Every structure is written in C-alpha cells, then in structure tokens.
Image (tube, grey):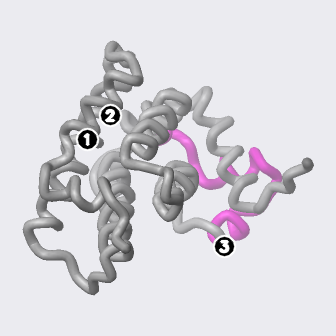
C-alpha cells in the first residue's frame, strides 16, 4: 500500500536526513525547509521551531505505543520493550538530539514531559480520575526521570546491556504503588 506523507512527515524526514551530517544545534529552519522543498512559512504553519519538530519526531511513534494500553493483551513489559527498541533503532537521531540541545529546548526535558504525560494520562483515564494523588504523581516523576536518564546513558555508552535485560531492569524499577495500575485493567 502506498503511504502519502503529510507535510509534517515530509518536514520530519528532511530533518532526519540533515541529522545524518549535521548536529541539531547547527541546523536552521531555513535548511530544513529548503531540503524538502517548502517555504519557511510552511514550516512555521506546522511547528514552532526545530526543537518542536525534534520532539514531534520522537513523540509521534510513542503515542502509538502508549495507545496500545487500550488493548487487553498489551502490558507494561510490551510498552517498555517498544520504547527501548525505538531508542535503539533511532540511536543516531536521539544521540544527536541529546548532545546538541540544551536549556529549555533540551531534548531530554521534552522526553521527560512526553513520558510523564503518557503515564499520567493512562492512569487517570483507566481509573476515571480527575486528578492524581500527589504520591502517585511524584512516583511517576521519580520513575520517568530515572528511566529516561538510564535510557540516555544506555545509548551514550553504546548499549552495553542487551535489550531484553535492559527492558527487564526498567520494568523491575517501577515503584510498587504504580504496579497496580499496570498489572490489571479496571473492570
């Protein structure tokens, strides 16, 4: 089946192509636009800046991973495995984003937000909660900060731990009070 790219996907492919030869901090919006044959105005119709694009490239595939929790047979192990495999498969892109972004545009800061939001939304939606108890919110932050940092270190150190073992480590690190939200679906 032929898949027609959206403008966002076209722009994302352009940046990925530029990432092969240039660091994130050296690439301009003008270069991204020229590389895919659009104007900078078109770029800005879809993204705030190149950092917004970098986050979109990361977040879009992860949305599909997190959406699978609606499926009764999809479990936390599957989600962690999918995320770790995404990191491994997109290692060069993610390393470029990690090492060449900083401050409020730091890729790692955005990754924290993506994962925190996904976990929070899943728990709130699956349990019909309007707000999370402070303890649960804090434990999610603790887990997300730790796992994202470990994922980045794992990539930077050239993935010395086999993927299956690393997935098991990340899964076993989930705090006990959060496990209940992932072990069984509410009826």
Helix, strand or loop for the magenta stretch, by majority = helix
Q: Which mark is residue 58?
A: none
For marks 3 and 1, the one nearer the N-term is 3
Q: CA distance from mark 2 to mark 1?
A: 6 Å
Q: Which residue is mark 1?
A: 147
Quarter of the C terminus within the rendering: bottom left
Tag 3 secondary structure: helix
Q: In this rendered view, identify the residue nearer to me: 44 or 110.
A: 110
Specify whether 169 is left or right of 15. Answer: left
Provide residue 38's location: percent of width, then percent of height.
79, 59
Specify whether 126 is left or right of 30. Answer: left
Tag 2 secondary structure: helix
Provide residue 150's location: percent of width, then percent of height.
25, 33
Residue sitting at 50 percent across and 51 percent down? Answer: 73
**Residue 6 is a magenta residue:** no
Mark 2 Cα shell of 10 Å, populated few (<14), some (14-19), many (≥20)? some
Q: How many marks?
A: 3
| Mark toward the viewer: 3 or 2 | 2
Q: Which mark is residue 151?
A: 2
Q: CA distance from mark 3 to mark 1?
A: 33 Å
Q: In this rendered view, identify the residue nearer to me: 136 or 145.
A: 136
Specify whether 148 is left or right of 138. Answer: right
Q: Which mark is residue 45?
A: 3
Is residue 4 shown above or below 127?
Answer: above
Q: Furthest-front residue in view?
A: 187
Mark 3 Cα shell of 10 Å, populated few (<14), some (14-19), many (≥20)? few
Tag 1 secondary structure: helix
């Amino acid at each position: 089946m032929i898949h027609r790219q959206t403008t966002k996907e076209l722009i994302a492919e352009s940046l990925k192509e530029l990432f092969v030869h240039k660091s994130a901090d050296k690439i301009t919006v003008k270069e991204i636009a020229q590389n895919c044959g659009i104007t900078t105005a078109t770029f800005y119709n879809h993204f705030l800046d190149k950092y917004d694009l970098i986050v979109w490239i990361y977040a879009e595939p992860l949305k599909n991973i997190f959406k699978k929790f609606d499926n009764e047979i999809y479990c936390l192990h599957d989600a962690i495995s999918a995320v770790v495999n995404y990191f491994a498969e997109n290692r060069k892109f993610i390393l470029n984003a990690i090492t060449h972004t900083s401050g409020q545009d730091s890729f790692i800061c955005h990754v924290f937000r993506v994962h925190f939001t996904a976990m929070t939304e899943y728990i709130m939606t699956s349990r019909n909660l309007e707000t999370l108890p402070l303890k649960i919110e804090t434990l999610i932050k603790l887990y997300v900060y730790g796992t994202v940092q470990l994922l980045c270190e794992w990539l930077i150190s050239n993935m010395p731990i086999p993927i299956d073992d690393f997935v098991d480590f990340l899964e076993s690190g989930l705090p006990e009070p959060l496990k209940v939200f992932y072990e069984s679906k509410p009826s």
